[in-house]
Image (cartoon, rainbow, N blue to C red):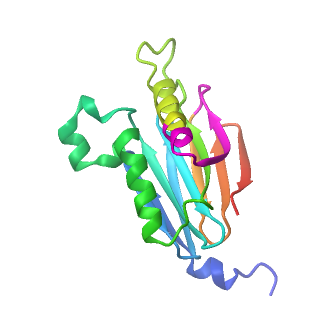
């Protein structure tokens, strides 16, 4: 029947990752989504062989500014959130060597100059950690002055990134 939804579409599930949070999944009907990455950075990870993926929506580069907050919400910071993401991925049978990454965000969305350069610092902290730990960054869209919304289809590895003026699609599969 033309226009009828597929079985997969009828039963698909969306998991929304908020600011300073993360989620992982190996359920093929799940789409992981995070909205409004401004100065925050989204780290999208996917293992195409095990069809396991995750998204981290980090807010700040370094947890030393608030150790108590880092204990309660480690995904808020790059230095505590990234290890948490990769530990979570191991729990859903992602293999470190096969895991492919796309990173987005780190914008300067304030009107005028950003004296704290949070987006820039977030981006630098993420890239430094990933390179130091030999992770494969296959794509990135960092900086600028627009926010981004990112979706990862766990069953396919398809990444959709929406910005105010366009949508781009990538594959981590």
Q: Nearer the viewer, residue 127 or 153?
A: 127
Q: Is residue 77 left or right of residue 157?
A: left
Residue depicted at x 41% and y 63%:
88
Residue depicted at x 38% and y 40%:
79
- The quadrant of the image that shows the C terminus is bottom right
Residue depicted at x 45% and y 46%:
57
Q: Is residue 166 left or right of residue 16?
A: right
Q: Residue furthest bottom?
A: 1
Q: Is residue 26 left or right of residue 68?
A: right
Residue depicted at x 65% and y 37%:
141
* Quarter where residue 61 is shown: top left
Q: Nearer the viewer, residue 132 or 65?
A: 132
Does 116 sit above or below residue 22? above
Total numbered labels placed on residues in the image: 0
* Quarter where residue 66 is shown: top left
Q: Position of residue 73 (x, y in %)?
A: 27, 48
Residue 38 shows in this picture:
no
Does 58 sit above or below residue 29? above
* Quarter where residue 58 is shown: top left
Does 140 sit above or below residue 107? below
- The quadrant of the image that shows the N terminus is bottom right
Q: Position of residue 96 (x, y in %)?
A: 54, 60
Q: Position of residue 115 (x, y in %)?
A: 43, 12
Q: Is residue 117 magenta?
A: no
Residue 47 shows in this picture:
yes
Q: Residue furthest right?
A: 2
Q: Position of residue 158 (x, y in %)?
A: 68, 61
Query: Which residues are drawn in magenta?
Result: 129-146
């Amino acid at each position: 029947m033309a226009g009828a939804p597929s079985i997969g579409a009828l039963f698909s599930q969306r998991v929304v990752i908020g600011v300073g949070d993360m989620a992982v999944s190996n359920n093929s009907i799940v789409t992981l989504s995070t909205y409004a990455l401004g100065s925050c950075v989204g780290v999208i990870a996917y293992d195409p062989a095990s069809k396991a993926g995750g998204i981290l929506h980090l807010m700040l580069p370094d947890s030393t500014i608030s150790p108590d907050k880092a204990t309660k919400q480690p995904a808020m910071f790059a230095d505590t959130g990234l290890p948490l993401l990769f530990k979570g991925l191991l729990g859903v049978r992602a293999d470190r060597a096969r895991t492919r990454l796309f990173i987005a965000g780190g914008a300067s969305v304030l009107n005028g100059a950003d004296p704290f350069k949070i987006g820039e610092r977030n981006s630098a902290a993420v890239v430094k950690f990933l390179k130091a730990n030999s992770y494969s960054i296959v794509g990135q869209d960092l900086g600028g002055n627009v926010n981004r919304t990112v979706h990862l289809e766990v069953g396919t590895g398809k990444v959709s990134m929406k910005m105010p003026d366009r949508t781009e699609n990538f594959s981590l599969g």
